Amino acid sequence: MAHEGASRPGRLNGTEGVIEMSSTTAYTDFLGGRVTFTQIGTDLVRMTGGFSDGFEDADAEHQIYVGDFPAIALDGVEPPAAKPFEYDFNGVTIEDFTGIVLRVTAGDTIIATSESTIAVD
């Protein structure tokens, strides 16, 4: 999945096959798993994660809310877990994902709220 805009893989540093990328990250742990945000290039942040606990209804519409960004569908729920996921946010930097709270919902019910994300250098 990708947020609006096109992904960019970074830039070549003059040596064929070697790509320079920033790798500043932020993360939070909840629902028996971890959600990590990684800066990829100058304006792309990739979210990866997975949960091993807390899901009860495979048929409910599950979504993850990342700060003030629009909700993202969370597919692959097999109670009590959710399969690993990945999502790209374009036109942003890691600062947009530092100190934010995530929420996971099942239908209209919030099933978990994370602690604020923590930056890692």
Image (tube, helix red, strand yellow):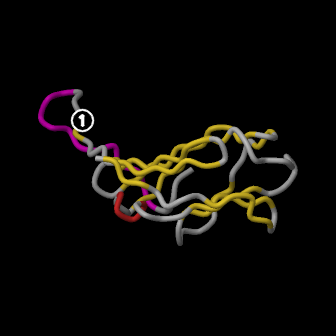
Q: Is residue 17 magenta?
A: no
Predominant SS along the magenta part: loop
Q: Nearer the viewer, residue 51 or 92?
A: 51
Residue 5 position within the rendered picture, expressed as x and y whole percent measured from the top left? 44, 60
Please report the residue visible at 48 percent of the width from the left and 52 percent of the height from the top.
88
Q: Residue furthest left?
A: 14
- Residue, disc 1: 19
Please report the residue visible at 31 percent of the width from the left and 48 percent of the height from the top.
24
Q: Quadrant of residue 104?
A: bottom right
Please report the residue visible at 75 percent of the width from the left and 58 percent of the height from the top.
111
Number of marks present in the image shown: 1
Q: Which residues are magenta?
A: 5-16
Question: How many neighbours does mark 1 have within 10 angstroms: few (below 14), some (14-19), or many (20 or more)?
Answer: few
Residue 52 position within the rendered picture, expressed as x and y whole percent measured from the top left? 69, 38
Q: Nearer the viewer, residue 32 or 25?
A: 32
Q: Is residue 13 magenta?
A: yes
SS assignment at label 1: strand
